[in-house]
Amino acid sequence: MVHNIDLRVSPEVASDMRRVESELGKALRVDRSRIRYARVSRRSIDARQRNVMVNLSLTVYVDEVPADVSPVEMIDYGHLPEGCREAIVVGAGPAGLFASLRLIELGIKPILIERGKDVDSRRKDMAGIARDNRVDPDSNYCFGEGGAGAYSDGKLYTRSKKRGSVDKVLSILYQFGAQEDILVDAHPHIGTDRLPEVIKGIRKQIIASGGEVYFSTRVTDILLEDGTVKGVATADGKQFYGPVILATGHSARDVYEMLYEKGIDIEPKGLAIGVRLEHPQHLIDCIQYHSKSGRGKYLPAAEYSMLTRVDGRAVYSFCMCPGGFIIPAASGPDQLVVNGMSPSSRGTKWANSGMVVEILPEDVDGYESAGPLKMMRYQEDIERRFFEESGCTQNAPAQRMVDFTQGQRSSSLPPTSYAPGIHSSRIDQLLPRPISERLKRGFVDFGRKAHGFLTNDAVLIGCETRTSSPVRISRDRETLEHVGIQGLFPCGEGAGYAGGIVSAAIDGERCADALSAYMSGRH
């Protein structure tokens, strides 16, 4: 007999499946020996009270064993037939990779074009940012195979209501090497050390199924004829033909420039801008788990989520990385940008998150001449200001948290995970005043809600500007096709329609479906 059952147990019990089965036996009123197989289908931590508990949902087999113990049904992508339809996918981030896999399922050959290098070759270029203050504009933390998410925490949490689509994305990631925990945890993550192997597995499948993948190939033009996309041209003089899924990521500013110059409809989009805030992980563990001793042996590095409103705009934590480190995330010259990531173990002694303020297009003055690129220009100016203050290096401005709220320079700074180093600066003056003033008041509010959070043991490192795309590329709500150009499917974070690995992957699959419908109607 098969039972679906929920248990609420201590972290120590949750860590030992034999003890979990003993609890299952009590709940089902059967001898534990009769439980032949049990699988956790959902796991979450409830830390709202001092007595931290773990909620488990399980499928339990009593007096029988399942015919198949695989947690997911693997997809057989097969091999595309000769002469099948072809489509172009620009960008090998989550949106582009999942669009390509879905095209293969639909019998369409993907031609995947990525401006950056493969996921292994990117490592040298990223190391060069911290070591030599050198940013390769085509190979960095934002550009290259896997996109901005390849060397991130690999967070897979999404607010998407499309549970079926979410589950499919998680299943595919598991199929290509992610740990089984991502199918179970309420806030799943892969980790920056494991995600590259998953990405390589997807690329190998695309090629094995008959698709094509091109690295170090930057798209510089979209080929149009009578309002219809015929293909793309690249910086090395090549041309590729077919309808286009444009999944270039939120930092492809040259692509936005090209679209604007060609008169393709785009619009400015709201942003969230601020800093990276770094605490000792032990302090966050103590706060979140209500214990002076921290998380103990059986609990993971604690996360947090903060949100308030100040003067009509949201102030909130973004991309929280427990047990992680801060990285230099510039994607071109004259930029200083930071981001965060975590290894799968979440084992460092630091916790960091973006702390950002919502900025809408109507909040930004003085950029009207930039038209739909006004928010991008605003982004650029902030990044340039931090870069110049740092002596045109990646050594980042920093300020202790309480000092920031009180508007004073920090006389010393704590140790940091940020490899290029930090120096004391007035971040409260470097940020535009509407951002810094809202952050100050937001931090005070967060300190009231979580005692000990507002502390000079925490340090602000700036700036954090790449939370999302500064532009939305217009598309039809039903067909997902660009509103004015046939055969162009703006996709993912770079098009302004996703926010994170899973939502970008879902959008990639949706755009592949839309492109297939378009091709079926045209041929």
Image: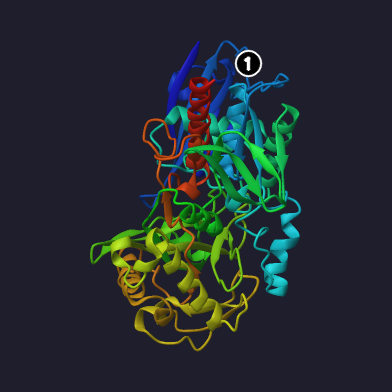
Location of residue 418 in the rendering, given as x and y in whole percent from the top left corner: 61, 70
| Residue at the (46%, 17%) spot, across then down | 3
Amino acid type, label 1: Asp
- Picture quarter with the C terminus: top right
Outermost residue on the front side: it is 226
The answer to whether any part of residue 19 appears in the image is: no
In the image, 95: left or right of 146?
A: left
The answer to whether any part of residue 352 appears in the image is: yes
- Count of picture labels: 1
Q: Nearer the viewer, residue 93 or 413?
A: 93
Q: Nearer the viewer, residue 385 or 167?
A: 385
| Residue at the (36%, 78%) spot, across then down | 405
In the image, 435: left or right of 79?
A: left
| Residue at the (50%, 68%) spot, across then down | 279
In this rendering, the answer to whether 93 lies above or below 311 is: above
At numbered mark 1, what does the secondary structure look like: helix, strand or loop? loop
Outermost residue on the bottom side: it is 411
**Which residue position holds label 1?**
68
* Number of residues whose C-alpha sits closer than 10 Å to that of mark 1, classed few (under 14), some (14–19) or many (20 or more): few
Location of residue 187 in the rendering, given as x and y in whole percent from the top left corner: 48, 43
Outermost residue on the left side: it is 311
Location of residue 441 in the rendering, given as x and y in whole percent from the top left corner: 30, 72
* Colouring scheme applied when the structure was drawn: rainbow
In this rendering, the answer to whether 52 lies above or below 450 is: above
Q: Nearer the viewer, residue 242 or 313?
A: 242
Q: Nearer the viewer, residue 86 or 493?
A: 86
